[in-house]
Amino acid sequence: MSASEEAATPGVRAADVEVEASRLVRIIAAIVLIVLSATFLVGVFDIRSPKGFDPAGPRFFPLLVTTAWLLFSIGYLIEGLRSPKTAKAEGDRAWFEPVTLSALLVLYALLVVPLGYLIATALLFFAAARVLGSRQLIRDIVVALVLAIIVYVAFTRFLDISLPEGVLGL
């Protein structure tokens, strides 16, 4: 912004406009996360279980995860609303991670059935690690695969919950 532009708009600096835009993006991302988590939470109650099934039935873990997601999203919204309207350091990318992770979750929801739980979950874990700043390629791949396999085995073998088979046919 040139000196003449600054004089024309007293009290408004480019840094303040950028901070307010970043804050607005965080608030919008939080609202999107709240809507998504609330939608999934409503969908959890469509999960049917046989009569006499214990309370920790097939809807317990989805209910736990979506409730936590909703609470964290509300906390993120509150943090965004309470954040100061002052300039931050250059290169602030506070909007990037939540927006990208939200997009990854939507993409995961679209791909989990056609690709299958194992492939879609491993891809989600790997991509989330990269978005959050990890640059250890081999470690990220190994951790994503191991976590996806452990969760798959825990759900299918120990909890007797079927997960989408996808292209692997597991």
Image (cartoon, rainbow, N blue to C red):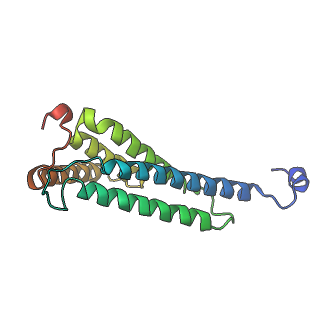
In the image, farthest residue toward the front:
51
Tell me the quarter of the picture where residue 85 sits: bottom right
Residue at (30% x, 60% y) in the render: 64
Left or right, residue 43 beside residue 6: left
Please identify the quadrant where the C terminus is shown: top left
**Residue 50 percent coordinates (x, y):** 14, 50
In the image, farthest residue toward the left:
157
Residue at (41% x, 48% y) in the render: 39
Left or right, residue 128 beside residue 94: left
In this rendered view, identify the residue nearer to me: 50 or 168: 50
Residue at (13% x, 34% y) in the render: 169
**Residue 159 percent coordinates (x, y):** 13, 55
**Residue 141 percent coordinates (x, y):** 26, 48
Total residue callouts: 0
Q: Is residue 76 above or below residue 43?
A: below
Residue at (43% x, 63% y) in the render: 71
In this rendered view, identify the residue nearer to me: 103 or 40: 40
**Residue 105 percent coordinates (x, y):** 38, 46
In this rendered view, identify the residue nearer to me: 46 or 133: 46
Left or right, residue 10 beside residue 68: right
Tell me the quarter of the picture where residue 12 sits: bottom right
